[in-house]
Image (cartoon, helix red, strand yellow):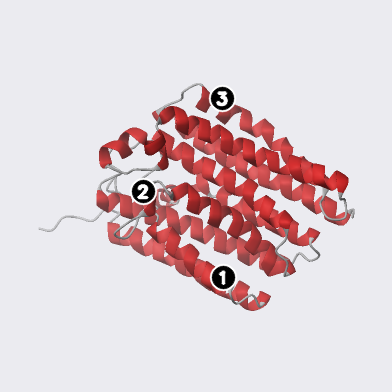
Amino acid sequence: MGESRPVTTPAQWLAGARPRTLPAAVAPVLVGTAVAAWDGRAVWDRALLALVVALALQVGVNYANDYSDGVRGTDAQRVGPVRLVGQGLAPPAAVKRAAMLAFGVAGLAGLLLVALSGQWWLLLVGAAAILAAWTYTGGPRPYGYAGLGEVFVFVFFGLVAVGGTALTQSGVLSGLALLGGVGVGALSCAILVVNNLRDIPGDTVAGKRTLAVRLGDPATRRLYAALVGVALAVPAIVGMLGMVLPETWPATAILGLGGVVLAVAPLRAVREGALGPALVPVLGGTGRLLLGYGVLLAAGIALGAVTR
């Protein structure tokens, strides 16, 4: 008699998509759309398509990470969110198909977005984003195992996501989009940093040399604080530039500094040495910080656009 296959419930599939990381997909679209409004033209159907691309990529990379870590056995020593493959909740092939389906949705939405905007060269960027999402923990030489995950998150969920959202709507890639991408990218990296800080013991045993493993616990905590600081510096910089050059920079972007309220609790927990399961709420708190930051920064930039 063959072994019975696990029956994965909808709730488990949802948990496997790691919803606490989804603000990393929403925030750059909000900020990029606000930047497009400042640069002259926000197009809401394109903003919606950009959101579909970002969410599908985030879900895809989460399932791909679950699959690749699960088949390698590196999820065996971890705490935190559900691991579908590592915990035997879903067959590896099913999780891999779910990742490919999410990437397919991202690709189709991205193709339509590019066609509407006429920015055909962005197809290469989109292909690179999907490849980076898969090879984070997949393939023969996953870069996430070499400590490079934060670099790719900063580029694709920060600079590319904000800049691409703005460019496909306004046709302009401005300095404001670049700075917005830096702020969002820094907090997206902070989500990954706290996730990997929590997993240092298990990753060390499994031979997964994330940046947190390479830096060690104390330096990783300092990196987390620095990334939050960089993000909060962005609205301050844009706001100050706007006071000097109001026609070029929106002074109202300083509203993004309101995110400091959401930063207090996760920063305190990281500074006070939270470990293992105690870092799970920090992951959620950092996600809320990113979403709140994105909403506030986008609102500030949009306010500047309508009152210009």
Q: CA distance from mark 1 to mark 3?
A: 39 Å
Residue depicted at x 45% and y 51%: 17
SS assignment at label 1: helix
Residue depicted at x 41% and y 49%: 16
Q: Earlier in the sequence, mark 2 or mark 3?
A: 2
Q: Would residue 284 appear left or right of 301 to someone viewing this image?
A: left
Which dot marks residue 146?
Answer: 2
Q: CA distance from mark 2 to mark 1?
A: 29 Å
From the image, tell me which residue sits under label 1: 110
Q: 104 or 222: which is nearer to us?
A: 222
Picture quadrant where residue 305 is located: bottom right
The residue furthest right is: 307
Q: CA distance from mark 2 to mark 3?
A: 29 Å
SS assignment at label 3: helix
Q: Amino acid at mark 2?
A: Ala
Q: 237 or 103: which is nearer to us?
A: 237
- Foreground label between 2 and 3: 2
Mark 1, other Cα within 10 Å: few <14 / some 14–19 / many ≥20: many
Q: Earlier in the sequence, mark 1 or mark 3?
A: 1
